[in-house]
Image (tube, grey):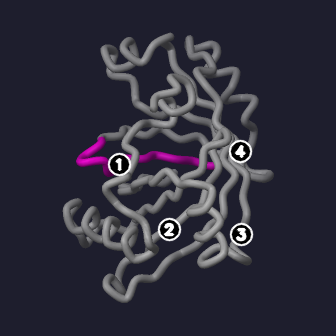
Amino acid sequence: MTKNKEIELKIPLSDGEYDELKKRYFSGAEKVLKKDEYFSRYDTLEERIKNNEPKVIRIRTEGEEAYFTIKRKSIKDGIEVNEEKETLITNPEVLYDFLGLSGYHRWFNKEKKAYRYFYKSESYPKLSFHMELVTVNGMKYLEVEVTDTASYTEAEVTKALEDVIKEVGLDPSKKDERSWYELICLNSD
């Protein structure tokens, strides 16, 4: 099992921005399909918050592999700061049965088509920025995250993320702090 602290942000993209980023950074990049199923014991976001349920209880399939993840998320100035625990699962059916027997139900699904790229910034040579150009349930975004945060403060990583967004030609003030649940299920604008 891995336990990471990841700091990430996501920027919504127009079709033109998506196409330009794909051409500049992601041509020849690895393409992945991630299918996420989120689980909860509750029916509403308010109930989940009231009962202190982790924001993410998820089974992700990516190719032939499946992972179980629990994340506790916080948002600070539009930047996600996550405490994440994740493990590879060899037989997801066992976990589906366990979740069902424990009172969990499938809360919502997310399908993410992504191109992966590791961006190196001359301004931050010691940080590795994991960038994904994504289409999630039809919505286009650039997601950028840093997971090797041990030697840096959250403020330093946040500034680095925002600077990298500027370096690739986007406006960091357009970051979207809504969760995928809010974007997919609540149709928030």
Of the two numbered discs 1 and 4 on the same chain, state the one appearing first in sequence. 4
Residue interval drawn in magenta: 75-88
Q: Disc 1 and disc 4: Cα gap in Å?
A: 22 Å
State whether the magenta stretch is mostly helix, strand or loop.
strand
Of the two numbered discs 4 and 3 on the same chain, state the one appearing first in sequence. 3
Q: Is residue 85 magenta?
A: yes
From the image, tell me which residue sits under label 3. 30
Q: Position of residue 84 (x, y in %)?
A: 42, 47
Total residue callouts? 4
- Which mark identifies residue 130? 2
Crowding around mark 4 (Cα neighbors within 10 Å: few <14, some 14 to 19, many 20+) is: some
Q: Secondary structure at mark 1?
A: strand
From the image, tell me which residue sits under label 1. 80
In the orientation shown, which residue stands out farthest toward the front?
16
Q: Label 3 is placed on what type of residue?
A: Glu
From the image, tell me which residue sits under label 4. 61
Q: Disc 2 and disc 1: Cα gap in Å?
A: 14 Å
Q: Is residue 106 above or below residue 110?
A: above
Residue under the image location 43 percent in, 61 percent down: 145
Where the C terminus falls, by quadrant? top left
Q: Disc 3 and disc 2: Cα gap in Å?
A: 12 Å
Task: Check whether the beta carbons of the residues at disc 3 and disc 1 lie within 8 A of each other.
Answer: no
Crowding around mark 2 (Cα neighbors within 10 Å: few <14, some 14 to 19, many 20+) is: some
Give left or right: position of 31 versus 48. right
Q: Label 1 is placed on what type of residue?
A: Glu
Q: Position of residue 34 (x, y in %)?
A: 69, 48
Q: Label 4 is placed on what type of residue?
A: Thr
Residue under the image location 36 percent in, 55 percent down: 5
Q: Secondary structure at mark 3?
A: strand
Of the two numbered discs 3 and 2 on the same chain, state the one appearing first in sequence. 3
Give left or right: position of 11 versus 102. left
Q: Is residue 49 magenta?
A: no
